[in-house]
Amino acid sequence: MIMSNLAISSNVRTLTHQDYKTLALSALGGALEFYDFIIFVFFSITISHLFFPDDMPAWLSQVQTFGIFAAGYLIRPFGGIVMAHFGDIFGRKRMFTLSILLMALPTLFIGCLPTYASIGIFAPLLLLMMRLCQGLAVGGEVPGAWTFVAEHVPKNKIGLACGILTSGLSLGILLGSLVSTIMSKSVSVEQMNEWGWRVPFIIGGIFGLIAMYLRRWLKETPIFLEIQQRKNQELAKKLPVITVLTQYLPQTILSMLLTWVLSAGIMVIMLMTPILLQKQFGFSALEALQGNILAIIGLIISCTFYGMMMDKFSMGKVLVIGCTIAAIMIAIFYLSLDNPNLLFITYSLAGFSVGIVGSFAYFMVKVFPTEVRYSGVSFSFNMAYAIAGGLTPLLISFFSDFVSKMAPAIYVVGLFLLGASIGLFLLINNNLQKYVAKDIS
């Protein structure tokens, strides 16, 4: 009866001051945490020079640097599963706060690490340890943030909440791009190698600690508190992730496929394309960076827009239309790169179209019940992202160098068509109503 009253009240009420504060603090923390995770790639060239021997070939030190970067992706499933396990048993807020601490401290430490010239082989090993800690943190942050806000807001605002959170993560990418641009313009190469590269990490660590302090004002989700009061003790003794895999396998598979689509949009269009524009299409670094900033701004706006659309229309319709538009716009963007005058326009539109990924979290939080929601979202998202995060850069680099410079477009367009197919599947199956969790539907 209490649960029914809670569901009814959450359906009819509007966003309160506390809801807005929850969304703001969650989005801010997500932006700063994702900045901390992604800033590494913007300074990878400098790091490769400082943390490996001078006589090592440049390509090898660069490969090893990206290997350390990729380690953060590979460890994500472990961090996500562990933090989600305790989040489903002891509460979302505790893990939500812990994740940002685990991100802020290693980021701060990276900015203070001695280089290879000072301590030899221990420099890259310490860097790897810090990167692994960051991976553990982000594995719990993203699914935890989606789960946290979805359980706070009214039913008809879940899409908006998830979209705002995803926009916050995108803002972290934008911050990383802007900071790297400012540092590159403000200091010389010698100053960058001596001390400049440390500044973005130290700033990120400090802001992360501030965001963690602000999160102390967040409250535990009301749905979790209600479930905890009446929770079956036998369920509490089980591993939530086992329950997810044995009882919610269809939801898990679909969530992993959507995450694969999401990873292609973010990694290829937002993170790898600026490099590809320079290597494959002859654009200058400044042109590529400016176009990328415009695309990220489009992504930030679009994530929230598509989240709102999920609240107004069926999941299937939004996915079919949004993913189809993304496939078309990404194809147009890559096909137009022979005309430099169109770069800013087509890249902006492509970035906006990729924002359909901001609605994917809506599906994930809807199909898992409260008792295992954090674990379900975390396992699906992190496992798929770890695989895609490890394979996508290798596949794109190989095929764009040895097969066709249009390989990135073919890969991403194909995956967004997969996303449209999932939307069509949901439409045919009445938006998967038989799988949607009752407590948040």
Image: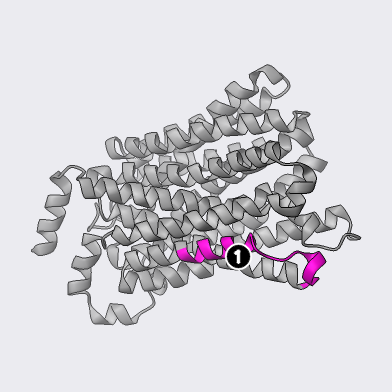
Corner quadrant of residue 314: top left
Instruction: Tell me if I can see residue 253 in this picture.
Output: no
Vertical placement of residue 203 versus 268, above or below: below
Task: Name the image colouring.
Answer: one colour
What residue is shown with label 1?
109
Tell me the amino acid under the disc marked 1.
Answer: Phe
Residue occupying image coordinates x 13% and y 44%: 12
Task: Say which element carries label 1.
Answer: helix
Give the dominant element type of the magenta stretch: helix, strand or loop: helix
**199 to the left or right of 318:** right
**435 to the left or right of 167:** left
Does residue 109 belong to the magenta stretch? yes
Residue occupying image coordinates x 71% and y 45%: 396
Q: Position of residue 1 (x, y in %)?
A: 8, 63
Residue occupying image coordinates x 50% and y 60%: 138
Magenta residues?
101-121
Q: Position of residue 271 (x, y in %)?
A: 63, 43
Does residue 67 belong to the magenta stretch? no
Residue nearest the viewer, comparing 10 with 170: 170
Instruction: Tell me if I can see residue 335 in this picture.
Output: yes
Residue occupying image coordinates x 47% and y 42%: 357
Vertical placement of residue 283 versus 367, above or below: above
Q: Position of residue 224 (x, y in %)?
A: 25, 65
**88 to the left or right of 409:** left
Q: Position of residue 397 (x, y in %)?
A: 75, 46
Corner quadrant of residue 74: bottom right
Mark 1 surroundings: few (<14), some (14-19) or many (≥20) residues within 10 A: some
Task: Work out which residue is located at the far right of the displayed protein and give it.
Answer: 55
Say how many tags the image has.
Answer: 1
